[in-house]
Image (tube, rainbow, N blue to C red):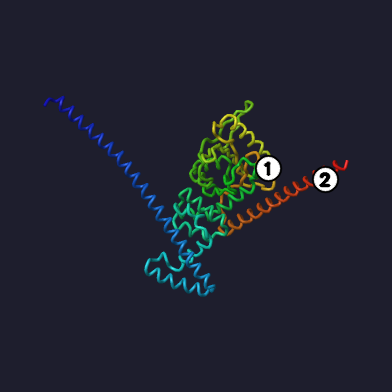
Amino acid sequence: MSKNKKDELIKSENTDTALIENSGHILFGKISSLIEQSRRVIHAHASSTTIFLFWEIGRRINENILENKRADYGKKIVSRVATQLAEKYGRSFEARNLRRMIQFFEQFPNFEIVSPAATQLSWAHFVEILPLKTPEAKLFYLNEAARGLISRDNLRVMIARKTYERKEIADTRISIDSPIPFGTFKDPYLFDILGIKDEYLEADLEEAILRELEKFILEFGKGFTFVERQKRMIIDGRDNRLDLLFYNRKLKRLIAIELKIGRFEASHKGQMELYLAWLDKYERQEGEEAPIGIILCSESGREEIEFLKLDRDGIHVAEYWTTLPPKAEFEQKIQTILAETRERMYQRNFLTKAEAELSETELSKTENEDKCE
């Protein structure tokens, strides 16, 4: 065999080997995807079956206890049944967990409410939300965990950092006719994750956000994508720069972020309005919603913000905290802010209703006077 033919044969064999390796790699990837997908389906089915089983056990025990209407009887029978079940089926059926199953049924007597979340979450997730005070908070955390496939540990962190309460505080300042969707922002934002020292400038805060961008986006919420820092806008020949520009895939709109050291000032409103108008004219793409903005201040002055009605112009103002107080103090501060915000919202709605009723009365009076004339 000539040298040329040998070289061609070797080259052909090498080509075949490369094709086999490449095809094998592609086939391996496809089969792996099938296996992983099947495992997820099996896991979801097993998880939802287990959660429904625990709900059904809670229902059966609850009905049995209610039939006898004796609290002491209930405690004794739960303890006795738990001992028997644990011996036969394991620690998942000990008395402590049976009591959780009873709570689970009592809090969600209609399983359909939690059925979608049950396909994505484990029983451990449901255990974390049982101590929460309101049904709204429980469902919020379940839906957030299911939507983001959040682990139990991260769910615990969300609850400890009062994510639901901070979203509620922000939402109470958004009116029905605001272009800002409910659930978009929080107040306050917890920037202890950025590792900022006591004394800092706006530039330091911006640098810290970009350095810890992943943590910042997690604090802001799913769907936020970084676009640009110090966004340049030339207006009437002058340079204007927006601190941070993000895009939200879920909302399909640009999000302008301004960072302020110190208390919110009314002049910040005009600055953000200018930025939003420029972005709407020059950066908004076809199919996108109008840009909205958030001004982050170390102190917000909530009553002043409500008077300005910024939300109607697509502007939200929120505080940021660079250090997290001790747990008890943190919880107290959040609850105080939430209570004050709810009270102001109630007063605002009450006044709006009273003004509407007064207008109707005046209109009716005028019509009657016209008829008399």
Q: Quadrant of residue 19?
A: top left
Q: Quadrant of residue 279?
A: top right
Vertical position of residue 100 compared to residue 238: above or below: below
In the picture as drawn, the residue positioned furthest to the front comes out as 371
Q: Position of residue 278 (x, y in %)?
A: 61, 31
Q: Position of residue 48 (x, y in %)?
A: 43, 55
Q: Position of residue 131 (x, y in %)?
A: 53, 61
Numbered circle sitting on residue 309: 1
Which residue is found at the position 69% from the left and 48% from the top? 303
Would you say 63 lies left or right of 352 here?
left
Q: Which residue is mark 2?
A: 365
Front position in the image: 98 or 338: 98
Which residue is found at the position 70% from the left and 49% from the top? 349
Q: Quadrant of residue 22?
A: top left
Would you say 19 lies left or right of 220 here?
left
The residues tagged by marks 1 and 2 sit, at their Cα atoms, a distance apart of 31 Å
Secondary structure beneath label 2? helix
